[in-house]
Amino acid sequence: MKASPDLARSLTELRAILKLHRDAGLKIGFVPTMGALHDGHLSLVERAQAQSDVTVVSIFVNPTQFAPGEDLESYPRTEAQDIARLAALGTDIVYLPRAEDMYPDGSKTNVRVEEMSDLLDGVHRPHFFYGVATVVARLFIHVQPDVAVFGEKDFQQLQIIRRMVRDLGFAIDIIGGATIRDCDGLAQSSRNAYLSGEERRRSNALSAALHRAVCRIEAGGAIDLVRAEAETTLLAAGFERLDYISIVDPERLQTLSADRLAPGQEARILAAAWMGGTRLIDNMAIAQR
Ligand code: AMP
């Protein structure tokens, strides 16, 4: 295990470090992040370590996935602490690109994964998945990993990345890592730091409502009724507004039209809800027994 990771603060530095590993024929695993690392991120790093010889973690707060008025400036930045946590895990390389590495002056090339990017979160944050796909494609080209790990916490993002990799022919295995939750069920997120004590206490209602909905649909409940009940529960629990709560087909992310799940059918429930000024997202798998 390495005592401390190699820090690459530019694309040139990253390429020099990676060349040594690639020339040695080592398998490269990659975890892209925006920093403010929590146990959810670290679980992905461990997953990448288990699947590769050399692990690269990137930390870059990507401006193209924030719309004007969103939290780009206030997004938590905890670089020294992040590096210490990655060092404790034995991460090999931390890539901290400068903005000009990711977006060279006058940059004009973007990646758009059509249709899937315009559903669910894409309805409410129309810029978001275009920014994500663009930065992830660029990071893939910089790192050229064999394996990359993304969290199921951001399920729509995971599926969009899978589609992009397939469409563009990246030779990268995409692995989905399970969502890491606090003891009360709230999915860990860098943005949970925005919640006040009272908001934090109420926020566990999101995972509880999704869990109950999963259980009821798996037991044969009517999808529309269960969805409506979850919505009512969340509003009663103190969420001011829901951007969406949807039960979709896990591949194409289209809302299910059937009344109930067929035997053996898989689905996913996803929600985005506002607690005070903080937008929380969560999702869970549904599988008809
Ligand atoms: P972010 O730094 O928020 O862009 O997230 C970087 C990666 O960590 C993404 O692949 C996320 O899906 C993943 N991630 C975020 N929160 C969690 C969590 N609670 N459990 C597992 N993975 C997570």
Image (cartoon, helix red, strand yellow):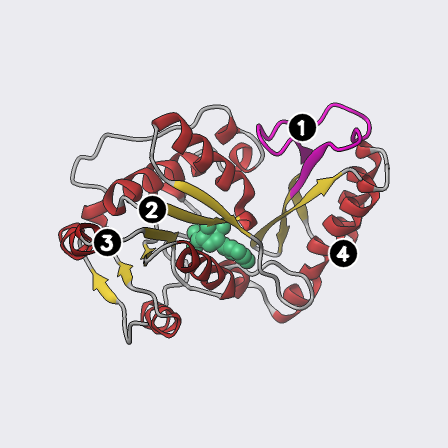
x and y percent of residue 181 in the render? 61, 62
Q: Label 3 CB, ligand 1: below 8 Å?
A: no
| N-term-proximal mark, 1 vs 2 | 2
Q: Which residues are magenta?
A: 247-270
Q: Residue beneath label 1, please?
A: 255
Main secondary structure type of the part rendered in magenta = loop
- Please, what is the three-letter code of the amino acid marked with disc 4? Ala
- Residue 63 is labelled as 2
**258 versus 124 height, above or below:** above
Q: Give the CA distance from mark 2 to mark 3.
A: 13 Å
Which one is in front, 201 or 15? 15
Q: Residues within 10 Å of mark 3 (few under 14, many from 20)?
A: many
Q: Residue beneath label 3, please?
A: 97
Disc 4 and disc 3 in contact, CB within 8 angstroms:
no
Q: Residues within 10 Å of mark 2 (few under 14, many from 20)?
A: some
Give SS at disc 4. Answer: loop
- Please, what is the three-letter code of the amino acid marked with disc 2? Pro
Disc 2 and disc 4 in contact, CB within 8 angstroms:
no
Residue 241 visible (yes or no): yes
Mark 4 or mark 3: which is in front? Answer: 3
Q: Residue beneath label 4, please?
A: 237
